Amino acid sequence: MNKLIIHGGKRLKGEVEISGAKNAALPIIAATLLTKGSSVIVKVPNLRDVITMGKLLNHLGAEFYYEDRKAFINTEKVKIFEAPYDLVRTMRASVLVLGPLLAKFGKAKVSLPGGCAIGARPINLHLMGLEKMGAKIELQSGYVVANARRLKGTSIYFDIPTVTGTENLMMAATLAKGTTLLENAAREPEVVDLANALISMGAKIRGAGNSIIEIEGVDGLKPVEYSVIPDRIEAGTFMTFAGVTGGDIFIKGCRPDHLDALIIKLKEAGLIFEQKPEGIKVIGPSRPKATDVKTMPYPGFPTDMQAQFMTLMSIAEGTSVIKETVFENRFMHVAELRRMGADIIVEGSTATVKGISRLRGAPLMATDLRASASLIVAALAAEGETVIHRIYHLERGYERIEEKLLGIGANIKKVKEQ
């Protein structure tokens, strides 16, 4: 197990290149199960979750090979239709093989993923949709067992927008008989990227990025070569790095149009943005200004940026109010920030942050992926040394983050725990 040692107070300056989006790559990799043959997915980040998805596809009988940010996948010999608990428990995105397996092969057995550190994320909406499409669903000893001769197009309404639910049912609908309407669908850029990948495979999809997606089923899909979008949350995290250090960072290869809500709030906090063809330059203020945020499904303020933004607010001038509406346990970073001197009061789903002039370095414990990122934000802003333990959470979602930070002037090193 590794830890990070960071000495804060250094102004970050330079250029950083954003990796491909893990949350786009994983469903696109799963979608290759709808095809028969060899696909190449480009700009895939070298992360633990990607390797886990590769292990799952290998288990199913596909050939998965990863090299130089490319995933090579051959689905000619898929012969197993079960995603076992040992793989699903380490990565919730494993449930994304449910829709493709059921649509392509008529059967699937996938372990229930259970909850996670930031709250329960059930798959009941996935199952409701598949049943409406004609699948027979049973729960057996912690597994979803699904069967269908051929799925049928139908209208499905999500009570709440669900990213993985939208993705699973969109993939399933591509091979269904007839037309499927997904209403109140998730609108995230990663959903749009999956739709574009499926269209490249021969799917007929309209409306991705809107609340209603229409999928006209086809008889088969073909292998594809496809490049995933850049990671908007990694880009947003580096924006907050600039914000807390008074930095000057050029974020290369990002899509600012995927971060409108975040950029609006960062501008309110005093950050300056200069958009260029290759990316965006971010200049941090001498001290940020307090501003309130409320997390919402896309295109609202992203829940995956809440912890990083709260850390920025912890050293802001004034008091800010942060309301979390997406996940129920997403304030676990607060206790660690308080150890650094932050003045934060949590009442239910609302945190009131009274900015202080400077955080102090401390030993910290990471609890989940985005909380881990927020602790790096805090450490870069803090006076003295910060040690962040259990960074395996961080390594699930940020590719070579310590190398990228070193390249723009951070005093950071990764070492093995004793």
Image (cartoon, helix red, strand yellow):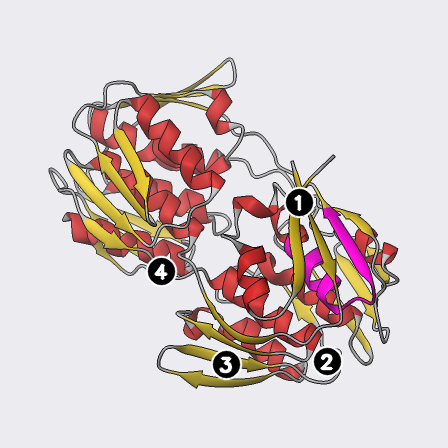
Q: Please determine whether, in this image, residue 296 is positioned above or below residue 137.
A: below
Say whether disc 1 or disc 2 marks the residue closer to the N-terminus. Answer: 2
Query: Which residue type carries mark 2?
Result: Pro
* Residue under pointer 4: 229
The three-letter amino acid code for the residue at tag 3 is Lys
Q: Residues within 10 Å of mark 3 (few under 14, many from 20)?
A: some
Q: Quadrant of residue 65?
A: top left
* Residue of label 3: 281
Left-right relation of 105 to 281: left
Q: Please report the residue visible at 16 percent of the width from the left and 38 percent of the height from the top.
A: 38
* Mark 3 → mark 4, Cα distance in angstroms: 19 Å
Which mark sits nearer the N-terminus, 1 or 3?
A: 3
On the image, the x and y values in percent for residue 372 come to 66, 51
Q: For mark 1, what is the residue?
A: 415
What residue range appears in magenta? 373-388
Q: Position of residue 91 (x, y in %)?
A: 50, 35
Q: CA distance from mark 4 to mark 1?
A: 31 Å
